[in-house]
Image (cartoon, grey):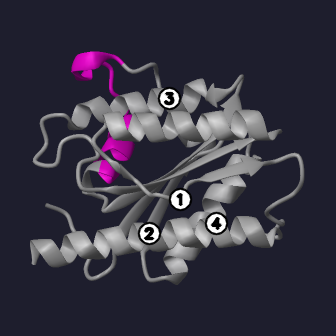
Amino acid sequence: MQLFMGDRPFIVGIGGTSRPESSSEKILRASLGMLSDAGCHTVMFSGRTLLLPMYKPGGAGRTAAANRLVEAVRQCDGLVIASPGYHGSVSGMVKNVLDYFEDLRDDERPYLHDRAVGCIGCAYGWQAAVSTLATLRTIVHALRGWPTPIGAAINSASEVVDSAGHCVDPLVEQNLQTMCSQMLDFTQSRAAKAA
């Protein structure tokens, strides 16, 4: 069972769009920055690294990029998943990546079992941001993960992250810090239980 990379929690970030520096990618990067500042080892899969072939059960046609992503999730202690809200739900690109987690079903920790997952829905307007967040939480539950009690619905109609990757909206920053703190609390609790 993977618990910590060395003595640091290993957190995987997944999200964004095929467009570099999308609002969901920026908010994902800001969240991972908070976790890194708290002592975590982080790795981010976003943008074009998420353009994987459509998931096919049984391992057929796996690319090196798909295998790298699945292996990182297999080894991680927690995840942050940020999806843009497309027509009120997660993007097809992010959903396809989440479908690859089926490759973890026969693991010692199947799917996302015993992993804290911070969920972020990001859209131009509150309705799609909230429904995207709710959908992500439902998917994480189905994958046996532990979605943090606080998730983040981000209205990208106004700028929330500056070009340096820092939150410019204090409420968003507080929400993300709470989500990241809950991830760390869960991860450290699991590590203590395993020790």
Residue at point 24%, 55% (across, down): 114
**Within the magenta stretch, is there residue 175?**
no
Q: Find numbered disc 3 in the image and state the secondary structure of the residue it sits on.
A: helix
Residue at point 57%, 75% (across, down): 34
Between label 3 and label 4, give the one nearer the viewer: 4
Give the amino acid at mark 1: Ile
Between label 1 and label 3, give the one nearer the viewer: 1
**Within the magenta stretch, is there residue 67?**
yes
Relative placement, left or right, of 117 versus 115 is right
Which residue is under mark 3? 95
Question: Which tag, 2 or 3, sits closer to the chain's start?
Answer: 3
- For the residues marked 2 and 1, what is the alpha-carbon distance in whole angstroms? 8 Å
Q: Find numbered disc 4 in the image and state the secondary structure of the residue it sits on.
A: helix
Which residue is under mark 4? 175
Which residue is under mark 2? 182
**First to last magenta residue range:** 56-73
**Whether label 2 touches label 1, CB < 8 Å:** yes
Question: Which tag, 4 or 1, sits closer to the chain's start?
Answer: 1
